[in-house]
Amino acid sequence: MNPVRLRRLWTVLLVLLAGAAGTALIVWALQRNITFLHSPTEVLAGKVPEEARFRLGGILLEGSVQRETGSLRVGFKVTDRFNDFPVVYDGILPDMFREGTSVIATGRIRDGVLVADEVLAKHDEQYMPKEVADAIAAAKAKEAAAAASAPAAEGEVDADMATPADSSPAPDSANTGAARPESGA
């Protein structure tokens, strides 16, 4: 092979190798700096690695804010309306920090409490992170299902307590009408 071509080949290979190494370093650095957003339910389920820095998102639980007198240290609970998780923060809180508003606390877990180094507050539920909104919607759906099953259970008890005269079989026309699909379907 011609020495000029050999030198060009080595130059191209070195440039490609340097580009691959640079890309690998960038990807590695980005992965180390990612902070994932988790809901209190996910944290309590153990989905957060120990000593990992992450963001805890949810709603500031009403009546949970406890301030230490003479310092900026404040403790509160973040909820997704299904589970609560305690947070401790030492610093100036945002102006929008109020009970019942969305908050995001960034930090690490120590002794079962998130020690936050940053707290953000949102003024409107419209800006809630998708993961937190999904967790709150799941909690509300579970509560609605529990509330709907409670009256149904009471109706079952009343049906079991019916007298033999009340428990006569229904006419066949009623049974066939109930099983018939709607005409608009």
Image (cartoon, grey):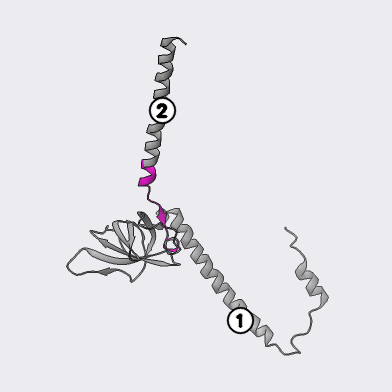
* Residue at x-position 21% and y-position 63%: 72
Query: Which of 121 and 170 lies nearest the eye of the viewer?
Result: 121
Q: Is residue 96 in sight in this rendering?
A: no
Q: Is residue 73 above or below residue 155?
A: above
**Amino acid type, label 1:** Glu
Q: Quadrant of residue 77?
A: bottom left
Q: Position of residue 8 (x, y in %)?
A: 41, 15
Q: Position of residue 161 (x, y in %)?
A: 67, 88
Query: Which of marks 1 and 2 precedes in the sequence?
Result: 2
Label placed on residue 17: 2
Label 2: which secondary element: helix
Q: Is residue 140 in sight in this rendering?
A: yes
- The boundaries of the magenta stretch are 29-41
Q: Position of residue 22 (x, y in %)?
A: 37, 32
The residue pinned by badge 1 equals 154
**Amino acid type, label 2:** Leu
* Residue at x-position 36% and y-position 46%: 32
Q: Residue furthest left?
A: 70
Query: Which of 131 and 5 lies nearest the eye of the viewer?
Result: 5
How would you rate the neighbour count of disc 2 (Cα within 10 Å): few for under 14, some for 14-19, many for 20 or more? few
Label 1: which secondary element: helix
How would you rate the neighbour count of disc 1 (Cα within 10 Å): few for under 14, some for 14-19, many for 20 or more? few
Q: Position of residue 162 (x, y in %)?
A: 70, 87
Query: Which of 114 and 138 lies nearest the eye of the viewer?
Result: 114
Kindly indicate whether the residue at mark 1 contacts the one at mark 2 (C-beta within 8 angstroms). no
Tell whether 73 sits left or right of 3.
left
